[in-house]
Image (tube, helix red, strand yellow):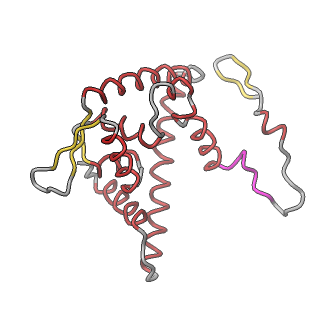
Amino acid sequence: MLKARGTLITISARNKAFRLTKEIAEPLDLTKHLPFRVAVVSNLLALNRDWKIRELCDLEPREMRVLLNIGSYMPIKSADIAYQSRIDSYNVSRAVKALDKKGLIDIRRDEKSKNIKILALNDQGKALYQQLTTAMELRSKELESVLTADETSAFYNTLSKIEDKVEQLLAKQALTKIAQGEDAPGDQKELIRWYKKGRSGDVG
């Protein structure tokens, strides 16, 4: 058993229910595989899995994430949403189109480059943003209640390290493929741009 804030936490029921197979030599123990464990939590925290949040709107998770980014950082460029959220530009563009169609955002062209879209929430979008963030803050407080202040700080620091390392791994893998003469898909080129942008410190 694990101990947190004086409360005993039992080992996951899934750990008890599933035994590693004997039909494969050295099977991967997914309960001790970091990417898998992060993905499991990510699946549980998907905005559309939360009934209270899902009742607020009919947006897809990707659309909600883009709306939240616009609301928190507007006015903001589509490319900056992709960088901040690590959603590839293609899916950001699809989400922006959906939000525009639902009448939740205002779009204007950048004065210097007409190809760049500047995004902001309109009144309807702001109202939904407030509803979503209120529900999300309540959920966040519930989640953080199992951690001490020091544990919460350490957790965020750990997440930052993992995010940086994942980006580095993917970008270097893409750079190696390109060096070998392979054509990089758009999402891989974008990973490289994000990686170089982070290393240069240019986040503007």
Identified at 42% across, 20% down, the residue is: 134
Q: Quadrant of residue 132?
A: top left
- Asked whether 28 or 150 is in front, the reply is 28
Task: From the top left corner, tell me how far across and down residue 94 is, in percent.
Answer: 38, 51
- Horizontal relation, residue 25 to residue 43: left or right: right
Image side of residue 127 versus residue 5, left or right: left
The N terminus sits in image quarter: top right
Query: Taking 89 as reference, is 120 above or below it?
Result: above
- Residue 146 percent across, percent down from the top left: 60, 22
Q: Residue at x 37, y 50 (%)?
A: 92
Q: Residue furthest bottom?
A: 181
Query: Image check: 149 left or right of 7?
Result: left
Q: Is residue 107 magenta?
A: no
Instruction: Give the image location of residue 67, x and y in percent.
Output: 36, 37
Residue 150 image point, x, y percent: 51, 25
**Magenta-drawn segment:** 27-33
Q: Residue at x 39, y 45 (%)?
A: 85
Nearer to the camera, 47 or 20: 47
Q: How many numbered dots are placed on residues in this image?
A: 0
Q: Residue furthest top?
A: 6
Q: Quadrant of residue 2?
A: top right
Furthest residue in direction right, as rendered: 22
Query: Per the image, is 28 magenta?
Result: yes
Q: Which residue is found at the position 42% from the left and 72% from the top?
A: 184
